[in-house]
Amino acid sequence: MSKKIVVIPGDGIGAEITAAAAQILKKTARKYDLELEFDTHHAGGAAIDLYGVPLPDSTVEAARQADAVLLGAVGGPKWDQVAPDIRPEKAILGLRKALGLYANLRPVRVPASLAEYSPLKPEIVSDIDVLIVRELTGGIYFGEKCEATLCDGVEKAWDVEIYSVPEVSRIVALACQAARQRRGKLVSVDKANVLASSRLWRRTANLVAQEYSDVALSHMYVDNCAMQLALAPKNFDVIVTSNLFGDILSDEAAVLGGSIGMMPSASLGDGTGLFEPIHGSAPDIAGQGIANPIGTILSAAMLLRHSLGEESAAAGIEQAVDQVLAKGYRTADLYRSGLIRTTTAEMAQLIEQHI
Ligand code: NAD
């Protein structure tokens, strides 16, 4: 049966990188005998220009009906002065809410061919393969908050970290399922020595993990995890953590690979999954044909794996990317003398040829 993919190019380099990823998905579909249907919709600045709002109802409805959504990125200086309630970024939060996306998955893989770009020593990062699973709709970002207020003559402000057992159970279960399809190691990250919400998190993680006897669960405090990601990232397989800790740790992990243009992500929930590179719309290089499309192409691989259940096709894309990089082809962000510089379109063409 044919699977529907809604493509939202967004702004800046969005059109160039989503076109490259759609080209790769089409080739993959031919090779692995999949039937994919593509439908383009607008969000972000492009939607403000066309409809006056960053997330039109037609885009939300199409996303709800689809099997998966592939997104470029939204925003740019053109829309910096619009009213706060219609800022382009509202499209991302609106889509997350409309699709009930409670889990954000960020894989960090550093093939040996890219290890030299890392701020860490090549032997520390070469061949790392870590998946960070971040809770996306709970915790301190959504808890009760109080803007600065005078209390007994002293100005105070606060944000409350709240987690419920169902919220922790579903994200840990999702992380266990991901670990089971990988190397079976799950580290749950918290601050249970200090925070009550972390103690509930840890207790719940232990209960959920009992249902996954093939997954080895361990626990780590967030401060130690931040250190271990820099000291020995190869020791990690899957990390699961709260919204706040995941926000920080996933950005730390993302720089291990050296270029933001390489990093994919998936947001999953009960309905349609959303797949996008972790970078923004890069207005400084938009329209020049030099953006690195690999983060979006690897997001398309995640789409096949997580929303369509097509593991071999997903792995096929990832292997093609590794092969092209190993042969020395690089877009401008990763180019160095002695390598072969490509445009966005040439990189997509090369990856397509290797599938
Ligand atoms: P950015 O990620 O767009 O760019 C940061 C730097 O990385 C720039 O120098 C850019 O040229 C480079 N870069 C990013 N992606 C690249 C790629 N694929 N290939 C080569 N180089 C790449 O971050 P920013 O400049 O802070 O933000 C630009 C706009 O994007 C803003 O409007 C911001 O709000 C928006 N943004 C959107 C999302 C999203 O849609 N999810 C995420 C982050 C930022």
Image (cartoon, helix red, strand yellow):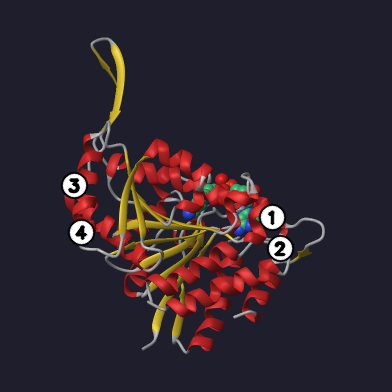
State if disc 1 and disc 4 touch (CB < 8 Å).
no
Q: Is residue 73 above or below residue 27?
A: above
Q: CA distance from mark 1 to mark 3?
A: 42 Å
Q: Confirm whether residue 84 shows in the render.
A: yes
**Looking at the rendering, in which quadrant would you find the N terminus?**
bottom left
Mark 1 neighbour density, 10 Å: few (under 14) some (14–19) many (20 or more): some
Q: CA distance from mark 4 to mark 1?
A: 45 Å
Residue at 41% across, 38% down: 224
Q: CA distance from mark 2 to mark 1?
A: 8 Å
Which disc number belongs to residue 210? 4
Q: What amino acid type should be assigned to the residue bearing mark 3?
A: Ser
Residue identifier under label 2: 330
Q: Secondary structure at mark 1?
A: helix
Q: Secondary structure at mark 2?
A: strand
Q: Secondary structure at mark 3?
A: loop
Q: What amino acid type should be assigned to the residue bearing mark 2?
A: Arg
Sequence-wise, the earlier of marks 2 and 3 is: 3
Residue identifier under label 3: 164
Query: Does the beta carbon of the residue at mark 1 sit less than 8 Å from ligand 1?
Result: yes
State if disc 1 and disc 2 touch (CB < 8 Å).
yes
Of badges 4 and 1, the one in the foreground is 4
Q: CA distance from mark 4 to mark 2?
A: 45 Å
Tell me if 238 is positioned left or right of 325 in this view.
left
Where does residue 90 sit, x and y in percent of width and height? Answer: 40, 51
Where does residue 250 sit, x and y in percent of width and height? Answer: 45, 48
Q: CA distance from mark 4 to mark 3?
A: 19 Å
Q: What amino acid type should be assigned to the residue bearing mark 1?
A: Asp
Sequence-wise, the earlier of marks 1 and 3 is: 3
Tell me if 30 is positioned left or right of 182 in this view.
right
Which disc number belongs to residue 222? none
